[in-house]
Amino acid sequence: MTTRFDYDVVIIGSGPGGYVAAIRAAQLKLKVAVIEKDKLGGVCLNIGCIPSKSLIHQAEIYRGIPALQQMGVTVDSTAFNYAHVYAQSRKAAEMLSKGVAYLLKKNGVAVLDGTAKLLSSHEVSINGSKTVTGRSVIIATGSRPREIPGFVFDETTVLSSTGALMLQQLPKSILILGAGAIGIEFAHILNSFGTQVHLVEMLDRILPLEDDETTDVLRKSFVKRGITIATGTKAVSMKQTGQGADVLLEDTAGAQRTVTVEKVLVVVGRVPNTDGIGLEACGVVTERGLIPVGAYGMTSVDGVYAVGDVVATPQLAHVASKEAEIAVEHIAGLSTHTAVDLSAVPGGIYCEPQIAGFGITEREAKAKGIAFEKAVFPYRGAGKSVAVGAPEGMVKLLVTPGSHEILGAHIVGAQATELVHEVLLAKTAELLPADIAGMIHAHPTLSEAVMEAARAAEGWAIHV
């Protein structure tokens, strides 16, 4: 006897993993439902990637005032009100959330409002009152900000990334704990609008997962802008005051100092949302809160898949989306890829200058004993960068000795998050730096820096 299910696929969560899985499933003629307890689009669209990029865009406009003044334009910024900046960011988030709703409806996806909990590998309860069944279930519940002892989020003095996005009035000063991508972007935003920023990182570098040479460029730029940076430093304790907080810091040598700020932003990582969703009911066991998966995002339980921040892959929206596509295509019988190729995942930090990259870093290659050659081309060698007043930066390529296969690319500078994809496309298509070097690039463009870096890898860069 064949078991009848309400849906072919039931998806828990509607973030970049969930809604992409739902749309792809519908495209493949599967009957699909997505369950969401909050707003469609998840963290990324509502309290993450999208509103933060709106804030960054507006910060960069504000930072352009001196350039206008150099042209003789008088700018009166005394009426500036950060509440308008906040409002624009919410408008962008709401517009895209509505866009997701439209796409789901257009593709015939059933959207079920409520909190989901697994009752078995094929049954999902909604708000404890309704049960739906699915031949397959995809867990795409995302993650939430991680707290640290002594710094509990109250979203008044101690902020999470969510609380920082919801600020409608700028603090005069802020201490940011964590110099990963989120901490760096908030440091850029708040400093741009005049907040005194103290950036603290436990490890010995800002952006410790990125290429050292590119992050050195960013650190110098941040220091020049007046951002105070303390690496190899941890927050020991905090005492709230009437005006904010006194935070005790300690460096690796044991030296302590107190920093007094109006607010503290804690961005030291994220916790996967795997608790309270009924994993134990269907036999899925977590490891450090993450769901172990094999090929196609399959868990140890037949018919149950997991994608995005709940699995041990980079917590990036585009990774979640690709994992979702892979899982759904497997459910539909189109097993084209087994997993995301982590060596070809681009990452971007949207500050000024921007940082972007993929593949292995020089530090990782040395630690693993991987032989490599590197080629570096400075931005200022590309005429466009000088013409637009953005000469700060570099394009760096890592290639295998002899054959020059692309191992990684790391860029710091204007539009780095866009430029990196040319090199990534070359790697994905199994092209070599010689192919990029020989391709005509329009002049003047920033992409000429990519061409010249490829030429440098081949030993014949022109403009350096």
Image: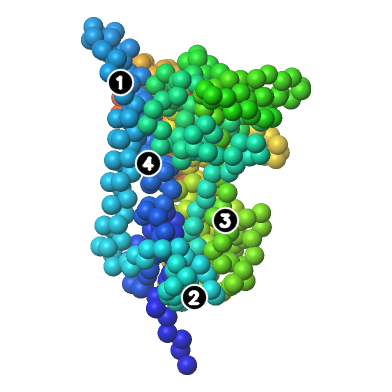
Crowding at dot 2, Cα within 10 Å, few <14 / some 14-19 / many 20+, comes out as: many
Tag 4 residue: 50
Disc 4 versus disc 2: distance between alpha carbons? 33 Å
Tag 1 residue: 80
Q: State whether residue 126 is above or below residue 385.
A: below
Spot occupied by residue 297 in the image (x, y as percentages of width and height): 54, 62
Q: Nearer the viewer, mark 3 or mark 1?
A: 1
Tag 2 residue: 123
Tag 3 residue: 311
Disc 3 versus disc 1: distance between alpha carbons? 43 Å
In terms of depth relative to the viewer, which is nearer, 244 or 455? 244
Is residue 239 in view from this perspective? yes
Amino acid under label 4? Answer: Ile
Q: Nearer the viewer, mark 1 or mark 4?
A: 1
Crowding at dot 1, Cα within 10 Å, few <14 / some 14-19 / many 20+, comes out as: few
At x 70% / y 40%, what residue is drawn? 368
Q: State whether residue 418 is above or below residue 69.
A: below
Disc 1 versus disc 4: distance between alpha carbons? 23 Å
Amino acid under label 3? Answer: Val
Amino acid under label 1? Answer: Phe
At x 38% / y 36%, what residue is drawn? 53
Q: Nearer the viewer, mark 2 or mark 1?
A: 1
